[in-house]
Amino acid sequence: MLYIYLWRILFLFVITVLISCEPQNIINQNKDYFIDSFKIKLKYAKHLDFSISDSVIAVRVYNPWQSAKDKSFNYLFSINKSKKNDFINIPVKRVICLSTSHIGFITALNKQMNIIGVSGAQFVYDSLTQLLIKQGKIVDVGYEQSLNYELILSLKPDVIIAYGVESKNVGYVTKLEELGLPVVFVAEYLEETPLAKAEWIKFFGILFNMKQNSDSLFSVIDSNYNNIKNIASKYLEKPKVYAGLPWKDTWYIAGGKSNLSCLISDAGADYIWKDNNSKESFPLNLELVFDKVSKADFWINSGSATSLNEINVTDSRLSQLKSFKNKTVYNNIAISNSFGGNDYWESGVVNPHIILKDIVKIFHPKAFPDYKIHYYKKLE
């Protein structure tokens, strides 16, 4: 009897310890986590910040579409299982991505198995995600104004990752929210520098409760990028560079405060429109552009053109440009699929150091002697 009695005492002790060790739901429903939390200052990103308190991460996204002013969107992520609709429980298991750049971030964290829906499945480049699409484990949910809402509802996503181009284009987000679906804006494409874009990996780290992993990944990206930038800064000769491709008589120019302008400057080159104050692209008449770029040394990111002949077909006057004659035209299309899905816009978002190394190699051929450019292709 004494033996049984002692076992009962031991059993009650173990149960008591287990109960005391169980994670407590410490979400304070009356707390304003955006005011009371410990704010994490990001190093580069301007459209995102977040705070951590208790078991909650409060994320704020600023001005997530072009020309947006004084707009902000708040999201609460709970590490514990909250039943309150205001919270998105993490780690998320079922994710819908409405941009391929979102897939780039998720791939960097090796979480493609958690994707259940995408927009434009044929444009996805990542091989594992493509395999999951072929297996029917990831479905195409359509585009912005033609999203298949019935299909999306049936998928029961934990979160839908959206983006905005213009205010009039984000009505679909309102529709998704009215259906009770959790939607978050990601505004990485509006960041002004390549490192600011890449720092959004921390947002995806929160979604999958992998903050330490995402912080570590970004630290490596940051270090590699700045090492290459320092090497490029030692080249005293700064070649003149422009980008894009006209459509009929209009050429959309990347602003002087844009991500592309920063990238070219970091690569030790001189962007033709570096003194422009716009973060966004702006239209110019082809003749105005022609006068300004006629003697420029390099032409990069030349739209969808895969050859010099295609550029010539677009407008024969372009063949008179110095860069065309010298065959110093490079496009970011080296890694693309047959539908035009371009890995530059997918994995490139977390590989700004590789993109930078590519164009440093293009502008300064003696740099990195054994390196072969990755995302870029020289047009012949």
Image (tube, rainbow, N blue to C red):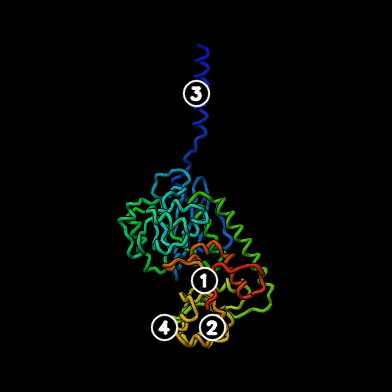
Residue beneath label 1, please? Answer: 332
Residue at the spot x=68%, y=75% of the render?
A: 235
Contact, mark 1 vs mark 2 (Cβ under 8 Å) = no
Tag in front: 2 or 4 = 2
Residue beneath label 4, please? Answer: 248
Tag in front: 4 or 3 = 4
Nearer the observer, 74 or 94: 94
Q: Position of residue 70 (x, y in %)?
A: 46, 66
Q: CA distance from mark 2 to mark 4?
A: 18 Å
Q: Type of residue at label 4? A: Lys
Tag shown at residue 12: 3
Mark 1 secondary-structure assignment: loop
Counting the numbered discs, the total is 4
Please say whether residue 164 is visible from this viewpoint: yes
Q: Type of residue at label 1? A: Asn
Contact, mark 4 vs mark 3 (Cβ under 8 Å) = no
* N-terminal-most mark, 3 or 1: 3
* N-terminal-most mark, 4 or 3: 3
Residue at the spot x=37%, y=67% of the render?
A: 169
Binning the other alpha carbons within 10 Å of mark 1 as few (below 14), some (14 to 19) or many (20 upward) gives many
Binning the other alpha carbons within 10 Å of mark 3 as few (below 14), some (14 to 19) or many (20 upward) gives few
* N-terminal-most mark, 3 or 2: 3
* N-terminal-most mark, 2 or 4: 4
Contact, mark 3 vs mark 2 (Cβ under 8 Å) = no
